[in-house]
Amino acid sequence: MDLVRALAELDDAAELHCARLLLLLRAFAGDDGAGRIEGLTKLAKLDFLLRYPVMLERALQVKGRSIAGTQVEDYERHSVESEMVRYRFGPWDHRYRKLLNLLVAKGLAKISIEGRTITVGLTDNGLSVASDLSSMPEFDKYTKRSAVLRRHFNLTGTNLMKFIYDTFPEILDLRANAPIRP
């Protein structure tokens, strides 16, 4: 198998995307595990900053925050683990509904609908799995960066979206469904 095919298959591996989302949800669950992320817009914007560490670094600089704990490796400056696209409300991945459905079906996440807002949190089992993942060296960067996101970007979905638009205006210049490049 060639490297390009291997990388393409890796991007299609729902398990890796689910693991990243579990770690993000764990960071927002808080010490008691009851915290949730309110809205798919907020989830997508947080996941954007998690997937694009160069953008996270830039966002922290804009906010005047330390970039400690978010060290960006050289290879991350020129590529991303999995690209997102420009959609109606900024960065988006068309797989979110599928990934969230997988997490719910496996008993790892719970979703509630409050008005028009979809709220996502972890089940006890999801919290346990996410804690196990966070102790694995392979997921160390996601774990640390997710904690940084909670500390500095725990805004409403609308305010986070406005921050993304203001900080990364080049995203708004992209055509709908165009891949976002670092």
Image (cartoon, rainbow, N blue to C red):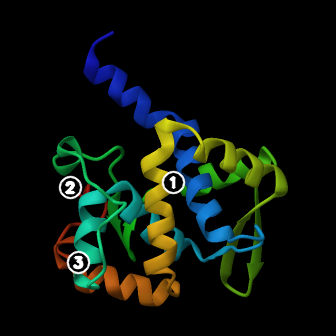
Residue at 58% across, 37% down: 15
Q: Residues within 10 Å of mark 3 (few under 14, many from 20)?
A: few
* Mark 2, secondary structure of its residue: loop
Nearest the viewer among 26 and 102 is 26
Q: Quadrant of the C terminus?
A: bottom left
Q: Quadrant of the N terminus?
A: top left
Q: Residues within 10 Å of mark 2 (few under 14, many from 20)?
A: few
Residue 176 image offset from top left, x and y in percent? 29, 66
Residue designated by label 1: 143
Q: Residues within 10 Å of mark 1 (few under 14, many from 20)?
A: many
Nearest the viewer among 137 and 79 is 137
Query: What amino acid type is highlighted by mark number 1?
Result: Thr
Chain-order first, disc 2 or disc 3: 3
Chain-order first, disc 2 or disc 1: 1
Residue 163 visible at all? yes
Decide if residue 131 is on the left or right side of residue 72: right
- The vertical placement of 53 against 5, above or below, is below
Residue 125 image offset from top left, x and y in percent? 82, 49
- The vertical placement of 20 against 145, above or below, is above
